[in-house]
Image: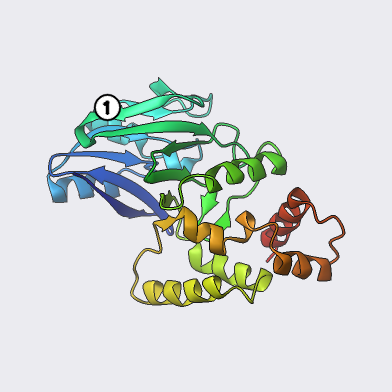
Amino acid sequence: MFDITAIPAFSDNYIWAIHNNRHAVVVDPGEAPPVLAFLAAHKLELTAILCTHRHQDHIGGIENLRGVYNVPVYGHRHPDNPHISEDLREGDKVSLAEFGLVFNILGIPGHLDDHIAFVTPDILFCGDVLFGAGCGRNKEGTLAQLHRSLQRLSQLPAYTSVYCAHEYTAANIRFALACEPGNAALQQRAQDIQRLRTSNLPTLPSTIRLEQQTNPFLRCASPEIIRTLQQRGLIDTSELAVFTALREWRDHF
């Protein structure tokens, strides 16, 4: 048995901790102090670090953590991420024996070229590619790559829990409602998110099913979203053109 707990970091990051009563593995530790405090409070030993991509708010704490716990760091090796000890690519697996977990690795470029996801049928650690009701910005590669990566994630089992790395859901919901105001599932999610944030609770994890129902970037065939974009001048209604228009609008929303 294990739990997955959000460790808040910076202003809106989540460092995810997979843990039982003895061991912990953390995902994307952008800073070390919150992780060290969590481990000390729960009397846990760190046994590994998982890394989805090389942005500093995801890797900034690795060196200090490894100074205390000499543990393997799993991720896609890159010149700007010198901390990776176990280099991963599409199709690789990571076994965490202490939790009975085996993660499959998906390459999901489009935010950064080195971005990967850690996936089981029940769990998705997706870093900055898929967010609650949103998606990451296209920093490297193409929007077509980002679209394809999101499509791949949307095809995971509907019950898969989605653990992304930022508390962006409330802001993303506002944009989603501008895109698809008639979506009843989205309206309900907006109410649920407001209650959670009013209580200062995380809006994550979500599920693949919930994202399919409410995330505009996974709903590029929605007639209402297409009509909304046509009112903004969209002519090409192919899914990639709709996705591109959504991402560009979101960048300036």
Pointer 1 residue: 71
Please say whether residue 198 is visible from this viewpoint. yes
Which quadrant would the N terminus be assigned to in this image? top left
Which quadrant would the C terminus be assigned to in this image? bottom right
> Residue 214 vs residue 30: left or right?
right
> Residue 219 vs residue 45: left or right?
right
Residue at (53, 24) in percent of width and height? 79
Q: In which quarter of the image is residue 49?
A: top left
From the top left corner, tell me how far across and down residue 113 is, in percent: 60, 33
At mark 1, the secondary structure is loop
Please say whether residue 139 is visible from this viewpoint. no
Residue at (72, 61) in percent of width and height? 249
From the top left corner, tell me how far across and down residue 182 is, in percent: 63, 76
Whether residue 12 is situated above or below residue 63 in the rendered picture = below
> Residue 117 vs residue 235: left or right?
left
What is the crowding at mark 1: few (fewer than 14 residues within 10 Å), some, or many (at least 20)? some
> Residue 220 vs residue 59: left or right?
right
From the top left corner, tell me how far across and down residue 133 is, in percent: 54, 61
From the top left corner, tell me how far across and down residue 62 is, in percent: 35, 35
Label 1 sits on what residue type? Val
